[in-house]
Amino acid sequence: MAQVDVAINGKSYRIACDDGQEDHLLQLAAFVDQRIQELVASVGQVGDARLLVMASLLISDELSETFSNMNSADDSSAADATAEAEQALAQKTEALAQRIELIAEKLEPA
């Protein structure tokens, strides 16, 4: 299992990932960091946990919009593929939410 150091909001985090997924994880971290930086520019430094929650909600909103667009597909075969994709994406989103909660718990003062 590989480990990657990612930077989010100026802080470094060592994250484990499957071998060969290092570049993908770095891209995901850059995406999250970009969202965090947009929030910081908008609301300021309101704490890591709060920024992570806010960024998670923004990303979830984007996913929700994507789901809505996928649901509006007229083609029935596309609808079947959409349902499978939605289920897989929902599972991945749930796993990501759990990871974010664990990170947020670690960031909270004891």
Image (cartoon, grey):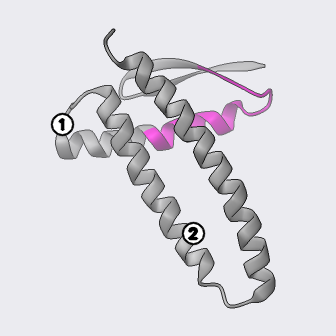
Name the mark nearer the viewer: 1 or 2. Answer: 2
Please state the horizontal and vertical placement of residue 85, each as a whole percent of the image. 72, 63
Nearest the viewer among 46 and 26 is: 46
Say whether residue 90 is left or right of residue 1: left
What secondary structure is the magenta-colored segment mainly?
Answer: helix
Q: Which of 93 and 13 is in front in this view?
A: 93
**Mark 1 or 2, nearer chain start:** 1
Q: Quadrant of the N terminus?
A: top right
Which disc is residue 67 wearing? 2
What residue is rendered at 55% in x and 77% in y? 69
Secondary-structure class at tag 1: loop
Using the image, determine if residue 71 lies above or below residue 24: below
Compared with 30, 19 (above or below) is above
Decide: few, some or many residues near mark 1? Use Cα within 10 Å; few <14, some 14-19, many ≥20: few
Range of magenta residues: 15-32
Residue 31 among those drawn in magenta: yes
Q: Residue at (65%, 46%) from the top-left corner?
A: 92
Residue pointed to by mark 1: 44
Residue at image point 43% right, 45% down: 56
**Residue sitting at x 57%, y 69%:** 67
In the image, is residue 103 above or below residue 55?
above
